[in-house]
Amino acid sequence: MRSVGGAWQSLAGGTIDHRITLDTYLGSTEEGGPVLGPDGAIFGIAARGGGRQSLVIPASTVERVVPLLLKSGTVERGWLGVSLHPVALPETLRHEQSQRVGLMVMDVAPGGPAAKAGVLAGDILLAVGGALATRPGKIARQLGAESIGRTLDLTLARAGAIVTSECVIEARGPA
């Protein structure tokens, strides 16, 4: 092993219990195979990450997720119901002085959580749950399974004014 770290969020919003990187490159036929400890116990599942990085999905993560997959065939994620695109912010619309980018709402899903909260296409999302909205992936990583049912404050720029709204995160329905 090259390194072991704390829990982290995958790009899809799932929580992985530990960030474990291997000191070897995985070929495509090795991905998904077991990673064994010195005593022969299964440590986790081998996975390829970005930049030729070799990762281990810990056994604890697998044990937590497999029952959900067996029960419903999926792991639910929270859903805001918007399409977002980064845009530069003028000084007058910055939620915090250091924030130079916001996320313009390009589309709002009818009946989705954001629509119910009054979000409109053309609004600029400045913060979600207190975290600055600077990249769509940053927002998506806040919407893991544990976010479903939680109320998040949305800070938006609309027609030159800063407005707030509360949004109850829902599970995304079938696509």
Image (spheres, helix red, strand yellow):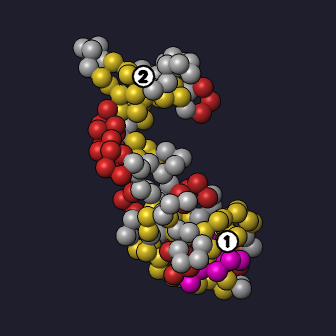
Q: Secondary structure at mark 1?
A: strand
Residue 112 can be seen in this image? yes
Q: Read off the magenta span.
A: 118-125
The residue indicated by pointer 1 is: 107
The residue indicated by pointer 2 is: 33
Query: Residue at the spot x=40%, y=33% of the render?
Result: 57
Query: Residue at the spot x=27%, y=14% of the render?
Result: 40
- Give the image location of residue 173, x and y in percent: 48, 64
Query: Residue at the spot x=75%, y=66% of the render?
Result: 88
Relative placement, left or right, of 99 versus 12 is right
Depth check, front residue: 5 or 104: 104
Q: CA distance from mark 2 to mark 1?
A: 40 Å
Check disc 1 and give the amino acid type.
Asp
Q: Reply yes or no: does residue 105 show up in magenta.
A: no
- Give the image location of residue 22, x and y in percent: 46, 22
Task: Answer above or below: position of 47 versus 124.
Answer: above
